Image (cartoon, rainbow, N blue to C red):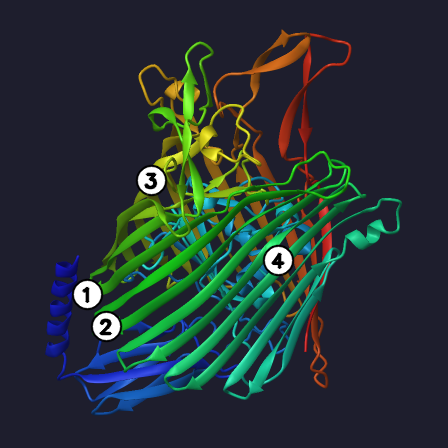
């Protein structure tokens, strides 16, 4: 490793020394109206075919052998900036771009003129980007704008069931998605058991979903990375934005503390459907609230400081018998520093806490569980030349897992107090990532991540015969819990298990013409934490388990190739991608497993392997009154959990079986039509193959009780899932003498009242010992909504 780094360093020194006769030119790009940094702006010089991109701080670096040239800066939603530059030495400039607004009375400050032109040259594939404006226009359930539900309209992304915020990417599990809010991990992604996501669209600037070709700076999950960036507060003026809906309302305020220097943003949401229950005899409630904040401090030209915070809670009460609370707490302090025109750094300390609490008064106990992590990251961006840029750094993440604490909550409770021991782990990584333009038609992004994971004490680890916590009973042809033969104690911070992995990443772009390219990528991902769940969708009571003596890290390899084209002068774009994924050490549970409150979870788990492959199509219309996209995916996702010896049958007799998130067909159609200055219409249609389920194929009687018989796992499918949603936005003419702006959003979810099945159950027909009937549970029929949005 040291030898490799030395060779890389010497090579880069050589490149840099040969470039010393070139003039250095760097700059920062900001929004003219708000003063916020603009990331992803394209910077082109008149004497070069190469273009740069500004980073998340609005910074870019360039070098040229010409003292005089014309610079052009472009960013979707901003006027193009052009200036003739004349300099003979290193210089750093500040540029301000002017936002483009469709009409002066438009409510949302986020621009509505968007362009999804594909960057043909950039070695980036399997990546989807959405602005807050695009998310805002998509019709969603109950009238609430929802980031996670919007990405379900993209190819390769499917849902875990109607009314849920859980999602699966390219056949991966929901735990294989890394959710980042301003680069900080978020574990619980939904409110109200999945009806809303925890991400407030008002406070979000943009999202980026990596489905493959994941850069080396990201790690810890096996399937995807969802990067959600919050807005910076306005550096110049006070502003407020909000909305009032049928079930929830929201308000965001932002402005300067020190003009052009220090800004703040606060955003809050709360639901109040439970208040209507007070008008009835029902003594129950169900509501959520969350708070977002971001503070941005531009200390000087070389240093910026940012603080991000999030807090959210869900509260459920059913009479006096049931009380449930859960939610996230997230904090992030980031310091960006510029060392030179070529080098800048980002140092972050982060904290994430997911809490789950449950009280059952009729049983007489309270339950608490959750996961906390403390994170430090240090990353350096190094612009070697116009054609070569580097990112390298380190990360360190400390985990504290609370599998569960149970306490009696009343004097006559029959429950004994117990604590499933906390579990601790430490995950470290070092990475280097390069993006390089080899020539006029070939560009590459390549990197290497080296990750290390330690399971730490204080903990007592069970010991089992032959090191197997699960035993196979040949007589009953079933798996059973092994009986521990002893325990081994580990003191505080003592190493229990160690794992390490090299994770190579590479993506290549081959330019065919100015409007066409072929791209390829490969990445290996190591995931050291596992979500233990026996449901198909993410639920608050899911248990996170670290790798250890009996649970090995997941390793996922993904290969992808795609064709990309901009059509008709960028008015349309086409993306076609195919992928193939192989995974090992994917956990599955034995039949009859008890997952909740289990003090020895390893006794009900077996390791398997996965395979997923598919073909994705995405066609966009980017310009005109009518815009939108069509996304279609045909895919398979399979798992195999064979026996560990020739005598064992494994799960499903050792045969391949469909994962819970397998969908053969997935079609989404999204359209937005700007009818006039006052009216905008949008619609989305979704069609998915039914998700896999396990149904009984018969029943037998045992001691007078009817017992269902199950054969192969996930051998059946739910009915196909589909619905059509529409919305209309009305923007009244603005009163020029008032700062107040408003709009009305009218929506209908599931226009034709499709009764999609959330679950199907079986029960015996009354007065019959032989007949069985099925019942279907549907969550939503047709759902109208209306929301009033305002800004001042």
Nearer the camera: disc 3 or disc 4? 3
Residue that badge 2 annotates: 49
At a point 40% along the width and 64% down the height, the residue shown is: 376
Mark 3 or mark 2, earlier in chain = 2
Residue that badge 4 annotates: 145
Categorize mark 3 by other alpha carbons within 10 Å: few (<14), some (14-19), many (20+).
Answer: many
Mark 3 or mark 1, earlier in chain = 1
Measured as percent of width and height from the top left, residue 557 is found at 30, 43
Q: Position of 687 compared to 773: left or right?
A: left
Mark 2 or mark 1, earlier in chain = 2
Of 362 and 609, the residue lying toward us: 362
Quarter of the image where the N terminus is located: bottom left
Nearer the camera: disc 1 or disc 4? 4
Q: Could you tell me if the residues under marks 1 and 4 are in contact, i.e. CB atoms within 8 Å?
A: no
Mark 1 or mark 4, earlier in chain = 4
Measured as percent of width and height from the top left, residue 116 is found at 43, 62
Return the mark for residue 581: 3
Disc 1, SS: loop
For the residues labelled 2 and 1, the Cα–Cα distance comes to 8 Å
Disc 2, SS: loop
Q: Could you tell me if the residues under marks 2 and 1 are in contact, i.e. CB atoms within 8 Å?
A: yes
Mark 2 or mark 4, earlier in chain = 2
Q: Is residue 234 above or below residue 677?
A: below
Disc 3, SS: strand
For the residues labelled 3 and 1, the Cα–Cα distance comes to 31 Å
At a point 89% along the width and 45% down the height, the residue shown is: 281
Categorize mark 2 by other alpha carbons within 10 Å: few (<14), some (14-19), many (20+).
Answer: few
Of 77 and 403, the residue lying toward us: 403
Residue 380 appears anywhere in the view: yes
Residue that badge 1 annotates: 440
Nearer the camera: disc 3 or disc 2? 3
Nearer the camera: disc 3 or disc 1? 3
């Amino acid at each position: 490793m040291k030898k490799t780094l030395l060779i890389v360093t010497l090579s880069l020194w050589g490149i840099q020394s040969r470039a010393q006769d070139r003039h250095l030119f760097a700059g920062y790009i900001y929004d003219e109206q708000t003063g916020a940094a603009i990331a992803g702006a394209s910077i082109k010089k008149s004497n070069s075919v190469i273009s740069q991109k500004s980073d998340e701080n609005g910074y870019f670096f360039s070098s040229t052998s010409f003292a005089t040239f014309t610079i052009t800066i472009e960013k979707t939603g901003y006027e193009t900036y052009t200036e003739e530059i004349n300099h003979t030495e290193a210089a750093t400039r500040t540029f301000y771009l002017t936002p483009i607004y469709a009409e002066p009375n438009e409510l949302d400050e986020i621009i509505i003129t968007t362009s999804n032109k594909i960057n043909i040259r950039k070695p980036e594939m399997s990546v989807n980007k959405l602005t807050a404006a695009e998310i805002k226009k998509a019709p969603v359930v109950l009238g609430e704008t929802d980031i996670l539900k919007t990405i379900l309209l993209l190819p390769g992304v499917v849902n875990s069931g109607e009314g849920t915020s859980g999602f699966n990417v390219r056949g991966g599990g929901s735990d294989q998605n890394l959710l980042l809010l301003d680069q900080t991990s978020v574990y619980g992604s939904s409110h109200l058991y999945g009806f809303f996501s925890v991400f407030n669209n008002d406070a979000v600037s943009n999202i980026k979903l990596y489905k493959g070709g994941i850069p080396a700076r990201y790690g810890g999950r096996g399937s995807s990375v969802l990067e959600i960036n919050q807005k910076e507060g306005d550096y110049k003026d006070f502003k407020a934005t909000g909305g009032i809906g049928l079930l929830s309302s929201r308000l965001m305020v932002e402005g300067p503390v020190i003009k052009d220097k220090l800004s703040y943003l606060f955003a809050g949401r709360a639901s109040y459907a439970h208040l209507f229950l007070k008008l009835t005899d029902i003594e129950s409630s169900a509501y959520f609230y969350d708070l977002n904040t971001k503070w941005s401090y531009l200390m000087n030209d070389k240093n910026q400081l940012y603080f991000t915070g999030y807090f959210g809670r869900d509260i459920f009460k059913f009479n006096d018998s049931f009380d449930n609370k859960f939610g996230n707490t997230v904090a992030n302090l980031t310091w960006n520093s510029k060392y030179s025109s070529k080098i800048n750094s980002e140092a972050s300390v982060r904290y994430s806490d997911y809490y789950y609490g449950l009280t059952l008064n009729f049983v007489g106990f309270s339950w608490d569980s959750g996961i906390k992590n403390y994170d430090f990251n240090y990353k350096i961006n190094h612009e070697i030349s116009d054609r070569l840029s580097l990112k390298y750094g380190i990360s360190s993440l400390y985990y504290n897992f609370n599998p569960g604490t149970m306490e009696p909550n009343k004097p006559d409770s029959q429950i004994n107090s117990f604590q499933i021991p906390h579990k601790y782990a430490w995950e470290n990584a070092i990475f280097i990532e390069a993006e390089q333009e080899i020539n006029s038609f070939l560009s590459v992004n390549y990197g290497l991540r080296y990750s290390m994971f330690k399971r730490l004490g204080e903990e007592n680890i069970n010991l089992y015969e032959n090191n197997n916590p699960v035993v196979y009973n040949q007589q009953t042809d079933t798996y059973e819990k092994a009986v521990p033969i002893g325990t081994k104690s580990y003191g505080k911070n003592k190493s229990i298990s160690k794992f390490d992995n090299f994770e190579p990443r590479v993506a290549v772009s081959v330019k065919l013409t100015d409007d066409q390219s072929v791209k390829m990528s490969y990445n290996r991902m190591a995931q050291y934490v596992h979500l233990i769940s026996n449901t198909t969708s993410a639920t608050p009571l899911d248990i996170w388990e670290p790798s250890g003596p009996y649970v090995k890290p997941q390793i996922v390899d993904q290969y992808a190739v795609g064709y990309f084209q901009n059509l008709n002068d960028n008015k349309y774009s086409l993306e076609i991608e195919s992928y193939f994924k192989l995974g090992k050490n994917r956990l599955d549970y034995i039949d009859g497993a008890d997952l909740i409150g289990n003090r020895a979870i390893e006794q009900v788990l077996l390791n398997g392997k996965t395979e997923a492959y598919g073909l994705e199509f995405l066609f966009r219309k980017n310009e005109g009154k009518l815009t939108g996209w069509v996304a279609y995916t045909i895919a398979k996702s399979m798992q195999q959990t064979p026996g560990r010896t020739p005598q064992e049958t494994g799960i499903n007799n050792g045969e391949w079986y469909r994962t819970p998130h397998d969908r053969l067909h997935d079609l989404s159609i999204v359209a937005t039509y700007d009818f006039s200055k006052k009216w905008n219409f949008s619609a989305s249609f979704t069609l998915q193959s039914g998700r896999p389920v396990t149904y009984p194929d018969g029943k037998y009687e045992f001691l007078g009780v009817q017992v269902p018989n199950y054969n192969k796992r996930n051998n059946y499918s739910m009915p196909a899932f589909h619905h059509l949603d529409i919305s209309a936005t009305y923007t009244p003419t603005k009163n020029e003498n008032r700062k107040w702006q408003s709009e009305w959003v009218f929506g209908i979810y599931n226009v034709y009242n499709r009764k999609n099945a959330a679950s199907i159950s079986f029960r015996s027909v009354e007065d019959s010992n032989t007949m069985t009937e099925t019942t279907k549970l549907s969550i939503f029929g047709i759902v109208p909504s209306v929301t009033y949005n305002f800004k001042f």
